[in-house]
Image (cartoon, rainbow, N blue to C red):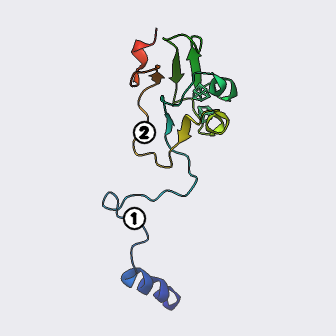
């Protein structure tokens, strides 16, 4: 029993070992891989991300010169390896450190529009 006293005293008078979620936000490590984003202003719809993706989470529909070309991103298949972000020639894909909310839908990116839902994929 006496050998437990240091532990008991440390737990009684020490600070909490856990974070006071949700009052304290999580600090992400530098380089951690969270949500994937595509910047449509930079994307040239070359399709390299589709070819490089090991889990086929990205699919391009249409030719890059087609005004209706779209990029389809499936976050449920994505393994967040960041290969697409490393290989994108125009730095249009990047991985955010944080993953604030879980993915709840597949996303299609068009040339000028905001992302719309899976049901609208032709
Ligand atoms: S995100 Fe990058 S690699 Fe993918 S189609 Fe756009 S420019 Fe090409
Ligand atoms: S992070 Fe990896 S798995 Fe996810 S879309 Fe990019 S290349 Fe594919």
Distance CA(mark 2)–CA(mark 1): 20 Å
Question: SS of the residue at dot 1?
Answer: loop
Q: Residue furthest bottom?
A: 2
Q: Which image quarter has ligand 1? A: top right
| Few, some or many residues within 10 Å of mark 2 (<14, 14–19, 20+) | few
Q: Is residue 1 left or right of residue 88?
A: left
Look at the numbered disc 1 and say if its residue's Cβ is closer than 8 Å to ligand 2: no
Q: Residue furthest top?
A: 122
Q: Is residue 107 left or right of residue 94?
A: left
Residue at 56 percent across and 35 percent down: it is 93
Q: How many marks?
A: 2
> Is residue 54 positioned above or below 95 on the image?
above
Question: SS of the residue at dot 2?
Answer: loop
Residue at 66 percent across and 37 percent down: it is 83
Q: Between residues 26 and 60, which one lies in front from this camera angle? A: 60
Task: Residue 7 in the image: state x and y as whole percent.
Answer: 48, 83
Task: Residue 48 in the image: state x and y as whole percent.
Answer: 66, 25
What is the quadrant of residue 17 in the picture? bottom left
Task: Residue 50 in the image: state x and y as whole percent.
Answer: 63, 24
Q: Is residue 102 left or right of residue 81?
A: left
Residue at 57 percent across and 10 percent down: it is 62
What is the quadrant of residue 105 in the picture? top left
Q: List the residue tagged with mark 1.
A: 19
Q: Between residues 57 and 89, which one lies in front from this camera angle? A: 89
What is the quadrant of residue 119 in the picture? top left
Task: Residue 80 in the image: state x and y as whole percent.
Answer: 59, 39
Q: Which mark is residue 37?
A: none
The earlier-in-sequence mark between 2 and 1 is 1
| Few, some or many residues within 10 Å of mark 1 (<14, 14–19, 20+) | few
Q: Between residues 73 and 45, which one lies in front from this camera angle? A: 45
Q: List the residue tagged with mark 2.
A: 102
Q: Between residues 67 and 96, which one lies in front from this camera angle? A: 67
């Amino acid at each position: 029993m006496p050998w437990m006293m240091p532990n008991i005293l440390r737990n009684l008078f020490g600070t909490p070992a856990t974070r006071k979620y949700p009052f304290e936000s999580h600090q992400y490590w530098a380089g951690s891989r969270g949500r994937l984003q595509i910047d449509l202003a930079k994307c040239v719809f070359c399709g390299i991300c589709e070819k490089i993706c090991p889990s086929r989470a990205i699919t391009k529909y249409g030719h890059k010169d087609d005004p209706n070309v779209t990029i389809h991103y499936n976050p449920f298949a994505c393994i967040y390896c960041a290969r697409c972000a490393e290989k994108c020639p125009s730095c249009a894909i990047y991985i955010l450190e944080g993953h604030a909310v879980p993915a709840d839908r597949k996303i299609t990116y068009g040339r000028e529009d905001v992302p719309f839902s899976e049901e609208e994929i032709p």
